[in-house]
Image (cartoon, helix red, strand yellow):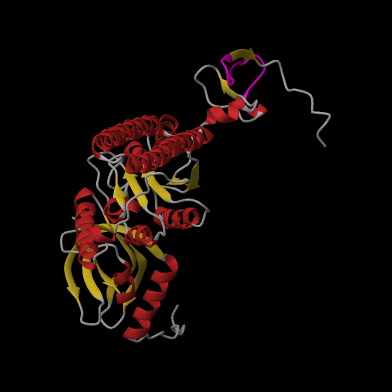
Amino acid sequence: MEGASEPPRRVLSVAQLLGGVRELLEDAVGRVWVAGEVSNLHRAASGHAYFTLKDDDAQVRAALFRGTARRLAFDPEDGMAVLVYGELTLYEPRGDLQILVRALEPRGVGALQLAFEQMRARLQAEGLFDPAAKRPAPDHPRRVGVVTSPGAAALRDVIQVSRRRFPGIPLLVSPTRVQGAGAEHEIVRALERIARQPRVDTVLLVRGGGSLEDLLPFNTETVARALRACPVPVVSGVGHETDLTIADLAADVRAPTPSAAAMLALPDGASLRGQLARDVRRLFVAMRGQLGERRGRLRQEWQALQTHAPRAKLAAQRVRLSALAEALARAASSGVAGLRSRFATGAARLDSLSPLAVLARGYAIVRLGADGPVVRGPGQVAAGDALHIRLAEGALAARVLGDAPPDPEKP
């Protein structure tokens, strides 16, 4: 309309304009995950790093500050595929759009393998994998800790091996996630928990196989340092035979699979019984040999005295030889009694660790079916289910009729 006044102009400086754009970006976009490839990487003397994050269609500048760079498990390189987590902002002095990097992860098998090799070289140079610092697992552990996921096949493998080899040694599970973001911190806490439990003198760290992405928590510096700080020896059984992780290198003993880890940690009860029986037989044979040799020497001395010694001296020697014979008989009797006592003690210790000793006291093992799981409560069965009841002598087949009435003698 003619004669109308124009609205007042709002004139902004360049700094004001870019400052407003920066605030708009930070408020509207915030922190994001962005996938791309590292390009034009530059490390400043201050410890900061700057690079371009690009794909086939676009690129954006990225700033990786010193504190974040120190926490990375790998060193970024030009051409590496990565995932960047950070906030989108504007660098006002140049008007450049950029991402302030808060986290950086390798992306793809090649990048993960490169990160693994970088960390392996760095920790090996530090001495974290030094064989001289590794501790052997005890031959006869009192209690074995297991760090794994409660629902994992790896735990079932360990339990099966335990039942075959030495069921009298208790297993104590410290549950944790074994894959996914942040799982490495749960693994560290599980290791710390199990190491504080009384009588645990061996720890198994196990999980089944998987891709490099699945095994990522076991390829972290956090877990490696926790393994070296654990006060008891750790046996690792991570993945399949062809898998190798940083945790395997840092553990005291490395096994190719979870089952193999259990076999390394648990003694073979049948083999121990056989070895004990063989040792006792060898001791008896050695004792018989020594007794026969001493009897022969005594017989020779007696014959020599009868031939050459005067009658008075002969009588004295007879007394001395009689005393020696009595001492030898006592020593033989004591030696045999000692062997019998050692054998009885060893056998009693093996029997006390056997679940059959519990059955002999009137208890029973109830399974759901012939080969089913052990029944620990009425919630595991339903009316009509078939049960297999193992007793100290023989077994019974039974069927569930329903819940039993409460025991009137119990409060």
In the image, 96: left or right of 89?
A: left
Instruction: Compare residues 372 and 364 and report the one nearer the observer.
Output: 364
Q: Quadrant of the C terminus?
A: top right
Viewer-closest of 116 and 284? 284
Relative image position of residue 338 (x, y in whole percent): 45, 39
Left or right of residue 10, residue 105 in this image: left
Q: Position of residue 144 (x, y in %)?
A: 45, 45
**Is residue 30 among what the camera can see?**
yes
In the rendered structure, the answer to whether residue 390 lies left or right of residue 215 reads right
Tell which of 119 and 138 is nearer to you: 138
Q: Residue furthest front?
A: 311
Between 37 and 119, the one nearer to me in the picture: 119
Asked whether residue 368 is drawn in magenta, I would say no
Q: Is residue 385 one of those drawn in magenta? A: yes
Residue 10 vertical placement versus 42 (above, below): below
Image coordinates of residue 55 in percent, x first then y, are 21, 57
Q: Is residue 260 above or below residue 55?
A: above
Report the label total. Answer: 0
Residue name at image x 44 percent, y 69 percent: 27
- The quadrant the N terminus occupies is bottom left
Q: Specify whether residue 58 is in view.
A: no
Tell me what residue is drawn at x 40 percent, y 64 percent.
31
Q: Position of residue 402 (x, y in %)?
A: 72, 19
Residue interval drawn in magenta: 380-395
Q: Quadrant of residue 323?
A: top left
